[in-house]
Image (cartoon, coloured by chain):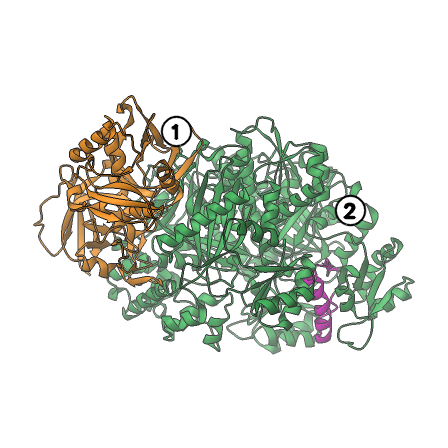
Chain colours: A green, B orange
Amino acid sequence: MPAKHIKKVLLLGSGALKIGEAGELDYSGSQALKALKEEGIETVLINPNIATVQTSEGVADHIYFLPVTPYFVERVIEKERPQGILLAFGGQTALNCGVTLFKEGILEKYGIEVLGTPVQAIIDTEDRELFVERLDEINVNTIKSQACENIEDARKAAAELGYPVIIRAAFALGGLGSGFCDNEEELNRLAEKAFSFSPQVLVEKSLKGWKEIEFEVVRDRYDNCIAVCSMENFDPLGIHTGESIVVAPAQTLNNHEVQKLRELSLRIIRHIGIVGECNIQFAFDTQSEEYRVIEVNARLSRSSALASKATGYPLAFVACKLGLGYGLFDLKNSVTKNTTAFFEPAIDYVVCKIPRWDLGKFRGVDRELGSSMKSVGEVMAIGRTFEEAIQKGLRMIGQGMHGFVENKELEIENIDAALREPTDKRVLVISKAMRQGYSIDQIYDLTKIDKWFLRKLQNIRTLDNQLHECKGLEGLDAELLRKAKVYGFSDFQIARAIGLEDEMDMEEAVIAVRNCRKAMGILPFVKQIDTLAAEYPAQTNYLYLTYSGVAHDIPFEHDNRSIVVLGSGAYRIGSSVEFDWCGVQALNTIRKQGLRSVMINYNPETVSTDYDMCDRLYFDELTFERVMDIVELEAPQGVIISTGGQIPNNLALKLDAQKVPILGTQAKYIDNAEDREKFSAMLSRIGVDQPEWSALTTMEDVNAFIQRVGFPVLVRPSYVLSGAAMNVCSNQEELERFLRLAANVSKKHPVVISKFMQNTKEVEMDAVAKNGEIIAYAISEHIEFAGVHSGDATIQFPAQKLYVETVRRIKKISAQIAREPCISGPFNIQYLARDNEIKVIECNLRASRSFPFVSKVLKVNLIEMATRVMMGLPVEKLHKSFFDFDYVGIKASQFSFNRLQKADPVLGVDMSSTGEVGCLGDDTNCALMKAMLSVGHRIPQRGILLSTGGAKEKAAMLDAARMLHEHGYPLYATGGTSRYLTEQGIPNTLVHWPSDTDMKPQALDLLHQHEIDLVVNIPKDLSAGELTNGYKIRRTAVDLNIPLLTNSRLAAAFITAFCTIKPDQLAIKSWEEYK
Amino acid sequence: MRKVTLLLDDGTKFHGTSFGYEKPVAGEVVFNTAMMGYPESLTDPSYEGQIMVLTYPLIGNYGVPALSKEPNGLTTYMESDRIHPRAIIVTDYSEAYSHWNAKECLADWLKREQITGVTGVDTRELTKVLREQGVMMGKILFDDEPDNIPTAEYEGVNFVEQVSCKEIITYKSGQANAKKVVLVDCGVKENIIRCLINRGVDVIRVPWDYDFNDMEFDGLFLANGPGNPDICEATVQNIRKFLANPVVRPCMGICMGNQLLAKAAGAKIYKLKYGHRSHNQPVRQLGTTHCYITSQNHGYAVDDKTLGADWEPLFVNMNDGSNEGIRHKKNPWLSAQFHPEACSGPVDAEDLFDKFVKLL
C-alpha cells in the first residue's frame, strides 16, 4: 500500500526534445502524472518543453516552464516543498539532475524522499566501475571496460584490451561522445571529445557482430519481478539501439536463451534494487550462449515506451505506482481491467521499430551508423508476419519508401561497402543487393544481420518477383494477391509490380488494385492488442490491422458517432511533439462531446498513441490505403486532418476524392494553399504582396530572374542531390556553387528562386477561423531576422517590437486570406515585415508547430476551439488582445548537433533543430534567459570567442560586445572582428583562424584549453574559406560541448539578457501564476 | 502445400495449409500463449491426445535442436523422446530457421515423427472461439480427402498409461549417500528429473500405477501428466497409503501431481473451461506478498474448498483465483499446479525444488 505521508510530488521532465531524449518521455511523464492524480496526490512538474502533453492544463497541478537543472529545481523545491520526487520519468536529464541534487544534499535538506528506485541504485548503474563491481557480486558478465580519467590512461587501456575498442563518455545519454576506434589515432580524437562531456571515459573491447537483446524489467518493493518484454535488434551490436531496427519479442533466440537472459535480468534488477522499471541490454553471441550485460538504464526510456506500446503494458504508469509503495499484486492489468498487473504480456503479433533519420537536413553530416544515436524519431509497425510488420514500418518512416521492394532504385557505387558500413539507407541497400543476386550468406557476412531476418526479407523479394510475372490485374490470382497482402505489400507496391504504372497514373492504379482486391474479398482485419494473446476477454481499444486473419476482434457500430483524428506519424525535424499535443487536444474535445474519438497514428513515442487517450486507437499506417480501410470500417461522422501536421494534410485531396467526410476547411482549399502557383495566384487576386519568385528550368532563366530581383535569393531545388534542400545565395559564385553541389536544374526538376529579404522581421500568425472569419489569433515575432527557418528561430509571443501599424496590417491581411478559402479550423501564416511593408511567405491550412506554445502563453486552447469549429459546435469569438499581457513567452530551439558528427552547426533556411522549449518571464530578458538556459546554454564564466560575420552583423553585435567587456569577460576575436572591436575601443585578444596554421594563438587551441565557454560565430557568407574556417570553429565548439551562437540578433539578445539580470533575479513562478 | 481444414466440434472451420506430416487427425484442441519453446512443448507428455494451437504467430524461427541423449538416458534438449500432441497449428510457420544449435527445421521433425502441422490459421480467432466455447474436440482434415476419421475422445481416455514408463528407471545424481526420491511417472517432463538430480538426489522413476510404498526411499515426487486425473485412481490409492504411513516422508507434486495429491487429500477436481497453457501465469503464495510468474499446462484444477481439514491451499492464480498448489498443515507435503521446472517458460519458481530437497 502506498505511503500515506506523500501528499505532494515533484516530477522532473526532460526538457526539449533532442536526439536520444524525445517524445517517449512526454508519454512516460504523462502516465506518471496520471498515476499520481489517481492517488489524489498534488503534482508539481518542471519541464520547459511547452509543446508537451504533460505540460497541459490539468495534467499536473503546478507546471514550471523552467530549465531542469539543479539550481532551478532547488528553487522550485524551496517554494513548493513536495514530500517526494520522481527522477525516472525525465530521461537522462532528470536522472543526472536528481543525482546532483542528492549528492549536494539538497534532497535531504528539504526532507524529500526519492520515490521508486533509490539514488544509490541509479549511481550504481551509471558509474561504469561501480556497475561492473555490482554485477560481479552476482556473477553476471559485463563488458569489462576501463574507466579512465585522462587520455594517457585511455591509450594504455586500449593497448591492453587490443583494438578495436569502443569509447564511451560516462554519465552521457544515448551514447553521446562514444564511438569505435580501430587504432590509437582514432582513439586520441574520440577520447578528447568524450572527455569534454564527462570527466570519466570508458574504454572497452568491441563486441561488434554479436546480437543485441533488451529486456524491460519491473520490480516492486516486495521483490516481485516481471520481464515485460524482450526485444531483439535486427542490426548486430555496434549500431546503437536507437539507430537499429528492433523487433519484439526476440525472434531468433530459443527458450533456453530467452529464459537465461530473463533470469539474469531479474537477478540484476533485484541486486541493484530497482523499484519501478529498468531496461537491461545484453550482447549475445551468435554461436553459443555467451553473453555480456551492456548496460542497465534505471529509468523510463525510449525502449520502455516502445515496450509499453508493443505489449500494451503501461510501464510508466505501473512504475510510478510502485514508486508510491504499491506491490505489483495490488495493481490491475489496465487492458483487461480484471486480471493482475503482475504478469508478463503474451503477444500474438510481431512488432518492428524502425528509426527515422533526417540526415539530409544537415550539411556535411557523417551518414554512417554507429554507437552513437542520430535518428530523430521512430515508428512502430505491428503485423502478424514479420514481412507485414517491416513493410508497414518502412512505409511509416515516411522517407519515400513503399516497403522493402518497389522503391525508387538507389544508386550505390559499391554494394559490398554499403552493406559493410551501414548508413540510414541500409534496408534499401539490402533490398538492392538481393535484387542483384547477392546470396543470404554473402549479405550475412557483410552485415552480420541474423539470417532469419534476411530470409524473411528474401521472402518479400521472391513474392515481388512472382508479382512481376503477372501482367496487369487480369493476371493476378487471388491467392497470390492475398499472400502479397499478408506479406505487407501495399496496393501501391502491387500496382507497380504488376506493371500498372505504364498504363495509368499511380493514383488511379492504386484505386484499381484496391477495387480488384475488394472484389476478391481480400480485406484487412482489425485485431486487438490485449496483453494476453486472447486468453482473457479484453475491453481494449488498442487496435491494428492485418491481412493475416479471418475475423475482426471488435464490432463496428456504424452509429455516426465516431470522429477520426489523423496523427502526425514519426517525429522528424519540423514535426514532432507539438503535433502530438494538437492531436491529443482534438481527441479530448471530441470526447468531451460524448462522441467516439478515434486516433490513427504509429509513433510509439507519443501520448496520442496511449490507448487511454481516445476511445479507439488504430496503431497503424497513415497512408491513403490504410486510412481508407479504417474509414470504411468505422464509417465516421468526420475525419480531422488539420491537427497532425503535413502527413495527414497531404492526404486531403485523395481522401476527399473518395468522399471521406473531412471536417474543417475543404480539401481543395488546402491544396490551393499548398500549391505554390495556386496560392500565389490567390494572393495576387486579393491584392496581398509576396516576395517575388519564379520556378525556373534553365540557368539562363535563373540568371535573368536574378538580374531583375537582385541578390540575395532563396533557392529551393525540387530535386536534391545532397546537402541542404534550400539555401540563400548572395552572389553569383555562391549560386553556381550551390546549384552545382546540391541540385540539377532541368525541365523535370525546376528550381524555385525567390527574392530574399534581408534585415526583415519574420512574424507568425497562428489563428482559428470559422467559415472564413478569424475567431482567435496569436501574433508572434522572431528574434532572428528572416533567413532562419521558423522552426529554428527564437520566437516571442506576444510580439514585443512590432509597429502597431504592422500588427494592424497583418490582422487585415490574415482576415482576407482566411475569408478567401473559407477557412474553418486552425491555420498559420508567415509574414515578412520591414518598416510597415508586409509580405506573405507561407500559409498552412492546418495547425502549426507553434500552436501549443501560443495556446499555453495565451491560456486559450486554440486546438480545442478549432476542433469545436470543425465539429460544428458553437464557439465564441476570442476578444483577448495581446496587449493585455503582463508577461512574455519565448520559444527557443534545441539543437542536437553534438550527436550529428561532422554536421555544420549553422542555422539556415532549412530547419535543423530537434526540439524546443517555451518559457515565461516578466519581460523578454527573463523569458529569454530561462529559455536559453533550458536548451543547454550556460552563462559564461570564462572567455568568449567572437567572429561576428559581415559588417551588419558586426554592428548588430557591437553593444553586446561592449556589455561583455564591461562585465569583465575576456574577449577573443578573429581577424576582422578583432580589428572592428579595437576600432570601437573594445579591448580583445586577436586569435587566428585554423587556416593560418603558423599564427598564434589559434582559436581552436583556446577551445581545447577550455579558455572559452561561449562561441559566437556568425558565418559571413558561403565562400569556401569562410566555410572551412568557420566550420572548424563551430564544429569544435559543438564537439567540446561549448555553447555556440550563430545568429547575431539572438547572440545580442542573449548577451543582453545575461548581462542585465542574474539567474537569482529570475522569478520562480508556475504557469498559473502568470496572469 | 496441401490445404487443410480444422473442423471443430461445434462446426466452426479454420482453413490452413499443411507443413508437417500429411495425416488427418482428431484430438482435443487447446491453445498455448507462450511465445517460444515449441520443441519443449511438443515433447511435453501432458499434450498427449491434444491438438496444440500456438497463439504466437511466428513459429519455427530457430529450428529444432538434436534429439540427442545424455548418458543417463535423458534427452539433451527435450522433455521426452518424442512429440506428444497429435498436431500443431500455427499462423506463420517459418520455413527458414536460423540457430547455431539447430539440427533441422520443425517441418522435418514433424514429418519424421508423423505429426500433422498446419500453418496459415488465424490462431487468435481460434483461441477466442476456444475461450468462449471452452476446449473442444476437433479434426484436421485434408481438403482433397473425404472426412473418414473418427471423432477423438479425451475425457475418458487413459493417456497417462500411454506416456508413463513401463518399468522402473533409476537416475543417479553421482553423489555419495544421495537421498532417494520416488518419482511417480504420469507423463513426467524430463526437466523435473534434471532439477532433482542436479540437486544431488537420486531419482527412482516408477510407472504411474506402481505401488512404491514398499520401496526404500526418502521422499515422493508426483509428476505431471496428460488427461483427466480421475482416471489415475490407482495412483491416488498409492498416495493415500503413503500419506497414511506413520513414517512421515516429504512429498511434492507438480501439475497432475498437485491434482493427485489433492485427490488423496479428499479434494475434488474439475475441468477448466479452457485451461492454463502459457508462460505468464501469475501465482501468489497465499498469506504472503510473494508472487511467481509461472509456466503452466493444465486443463483440470483442484477445487480447494473440498480439501480435507488438514490441508490448505498454498498458491492461488492471481487472474482467475483458481488453485495453484496445496500443502499439508503439519507434514512436509506440498504441491504446485504450475511447473517450477519450467522448460519451456520462466524459471522463477525453481526454488521449490530447493525447498523440497531441503525437506529430505
Q: Secondary structure at mark 2?
A: helix
Residue kind at label 2, given as amino acid type? Asn
- Above or below — where is B198 with respect to A494? above
Residue kind at label 1, given as amino acid type? Leu
Q: On the rendered structure, is B258 left or right of A849? A: left
- Report if residue A1023 lies within the magenta region: yes
Q: Are there few (<14), some (14-19), or many (20+) residues within 10 Å of tag 2?
A: many
Number of marks drawn: 2
Q: Are there few (<14), some (14-19), or many (20+) residues within 10 Å of tag 1?
A: some
Q: On the rendered structure, is B28 left or right of A611? A: left
Q: Secondary structure at mark 1?
A: loop
* Label ID, residue A615: none
Query: Splitting the image into 4 quarters, where does residue A491 fall?
Result: bottom left
* Label ID, residue A925: 2
Q: Position of residue A915 (x, y in %)?
A: 62, 52
Q: Is residue A249 visible?
A: no
Q: Residue at x 51, y 37 (%)?
A: A589
Q: Position of residue A475 (x, y in %)?
A: 25, 66
Bounds of the magenta segment: A1019-1047
Q: Residue at x 52, y 30 (%)?
A: A38
B138 or A877, nearer to the observer: B138
Residue contact at pointers 2 and 1, CB within 8 angstroms: no
Report the Cα–Cα distance between label 2 and label 1: 62 Å
Between disc 2 and disc 1, the foreground one is 1
Where does the C terminus of chain A fall, quadrant-wise? top right
Which chain is mark 2 on? A
Circle 1 residue: B286
